[in-house]
Image (cartoon, rainbow, N blue to C red):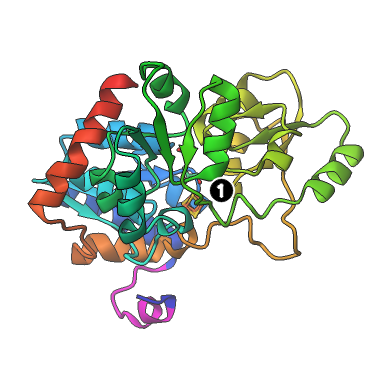
Amino acid sequence: MSLAGVMENPTLPRGRAGMETEIRRLKRALNAVILAHFYQDSEIQDMADFIGDSLQLAQQAARTDADVIVFAGVHFMAETAKILNPTRQVLLPDLKAGCSLAESCPPHLFKPFRERYQDHLVINYINCSAEIKAMSDVICTSSNAAKIIAQVPPERPILFGPDRNLGNYLIKKTGREMRLWQGSCIVHETFSEQKLLRLKVRHPGAKVLAHPECEERVLRNADHVGSTTSLLNYARESMDREFIIATEPGIIHQMEKACPEKTFIPAPPESSCACNECPHMRLNTLEKLWLCMKNRAPEITMEEDLRLRALRPIERMLELS
Ligand code: 13P
Ligand code: SF4
């Protein structure tokens, strides 16, 4: 529903405080847990029971005993929670909150690719649809990918998808050759190396923290590369005072909360737009969070056969992590 639609709603709680009170009340009434990704708006993060990266959110979804999982993130994340929790209701504030990376790997194109390399072990990044997960041997996230690759016997060839930037980064990091699907994320490919270098000149003491979905020309200028949680931990533990953040700037909210004395500068995108903000993540709003709990919709549903096929590689990931 558009924000305009929400504004027309006569029962809309008054102000942010009213909205927060209502969300808390609904959470108790539904016995719900709110899981939020670091890329969500700060006001959504502040309402969450748990904030984390993709791996932590999947782990949290696997161990929850709530009746309802409210997933403040994008579709593939809520879908993963549903795959792990067939009997619990999984709500997503906006069903259109997709992921450009997941969309860059359509099942009808991936299927023949996978069939061409039948002897390969298929490792797919969690940013993909349930159909793609069902065609995988094991799923990974940016926090456990290197660890999972290290557990594959050296003689077994690997097919890695859908992110070519993460794939290339892992080939360098692990020294393991892999055949890559050529997908990518529009947000992480938006950063400009030229502008980053100019920013570094203006902030000579700043450390560059980058997500491995960024292109090599950005990663080669980074002091630390890692998942969102890894970037947050680095910022927290570092003795440095200034950081340039080459990932979605939603993560800066937790960085500033953890280290109010430090400065975090978003890495500049190629154009003067706000293209470093994930347009999918930002479809979720506080109003839609409240509405989805009030209406118990939109809900993630899935055919049981697909769920079972997608579950196996996710469980393998959780075992190997
Ligand atoms: P993390 O697993 O590092 O949180 O990454 C998720 C994501 O979508 C990055 O774009
Ligand atoms: Fe997908 Fe990129 Fe958004 Fe992450 S930042 S959810 S990979 S579109």
Numbered disc 1: secondary structure: helix
- Would you say residue 101 sits in the magenta stretch? no
In the rendered image of this protein, does residue 290 appear above or below residue 226?
A: below
Give left or right: position of 169 versus 56.
right
Q: Which residue lies at the image location 90% right of the left edge and 41% below the top edge?
A: 202
| Residue 170, x across and y down, in percent | 54, 29
| Residue 134, x across and y down, in percent | 23, 45
Q: Nearer the viewer, residue 211 or 177?
A: 177
In the rendered image of this protein, does residue 228 appear above or below residue 40?
A: above
Q: Nearer the viewer, residue 273 or 33?
A: 273
Q: Which residue lies at the image location 61% right of the left edge and 42% below the top edge?
A: 252
| Residue 157, x across and y down, in percent | 40, 28
Q: Nearer the viewer, residue 234 or 18?
A: 234
Quarter of the image holding residue 284?
bottom left
Total marks shown come to 1
Q: Disc 1 marks which residue?
A: 250
Read off the magenta span: 4-14
Residue type at tag 1 = Gly
Q: Which residue lies at the image location 39% right of the left edge and 51% below the top edge?
A: 73
Quarter of the image holding residue 251?
top right
Quadrant in the picture for the N terminus:
bottom left
Look at the numbered disc 1 and say if its residue's Cβ is closer than 8 Å to ligand 2: no
- Would you say residue 5 sits in the magenta stretch? yes
